[in-house]
Amino acid sequence: MPQFSSHRQPRRSGPRQHLSRPVKLYDPLSERYFSGHLLDESDQGGRLRLEGHCPLQPGAQVRLYVAPVGQSAGLVSLQSMQTAQVAWMRRDGQGCLQAGVRLLAASNRVAQAA
């Protein structure tokens, strides 16, 4: 049976809100932008669904833009993106990547894009 350390942070400290909003993710290692959707959010991060091949790794720092309600995540500048860290990843049954991301700064809140 796996042992967990007592100093491990909980995955979620707040409630999740289920939704579907366009996102744009920038991976500085590959220097590429990826489009997808935010599937749910909390105060500290969210769960994304990204289409196609996305070379992310858990622990990687990325930049994230969540489009306001009713808008697309078309062209986005890096200055308008929030810094986040990939917490976990998995492929779903349709070949898309689902990833959990943590926002890294207290001022970075996915909900601010509303």
Image (cartoon, rainbow, N blue to C red):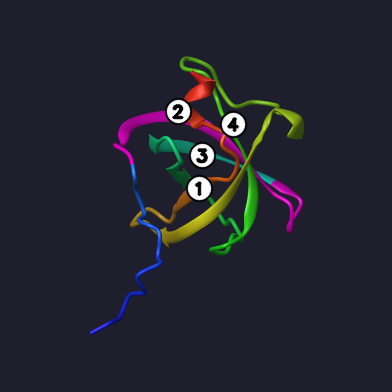
Mark positioned earlier in the residue sequence (3 or 4)? 3
Q: Which residues are magenta?
A: 14-32
**Which one is closest to the eye, mark 1 or mark 2?**
1
Horizontal and vertical percent position of residue 46: 43, 42
Horizontal and vertical percent position of residue 5: 36, 74
Furthest residue to the bottom? 1
Going by the image, does 42 lie left or right of 51? left
Horizontal and vertical percent position of residue 105: 60, 40
Q: Amino acid at mark 4?
A: Ser
Label 3 close to label 2 by CB (< 8 Å)? no
**Which one is closest to the eye, mark 1 or mark 3?**
1
Pick the front one: 91 or 113: 113
Q: Amino acid at mark 3?
A: Gly
Residue 70 shown in magenta: no
Q: Which residue: 45% across, 44% down?
A: 48
Horizontal and vertical percent position of residue 80: 70, 28
Q: Amino acid at mark 1?
A: Arg
Label 1 close to label 3 by CB (< 8 Å)? no
Going by the image, does 93 lie left or right of 50? left
Write down the residue under mark 3: 36
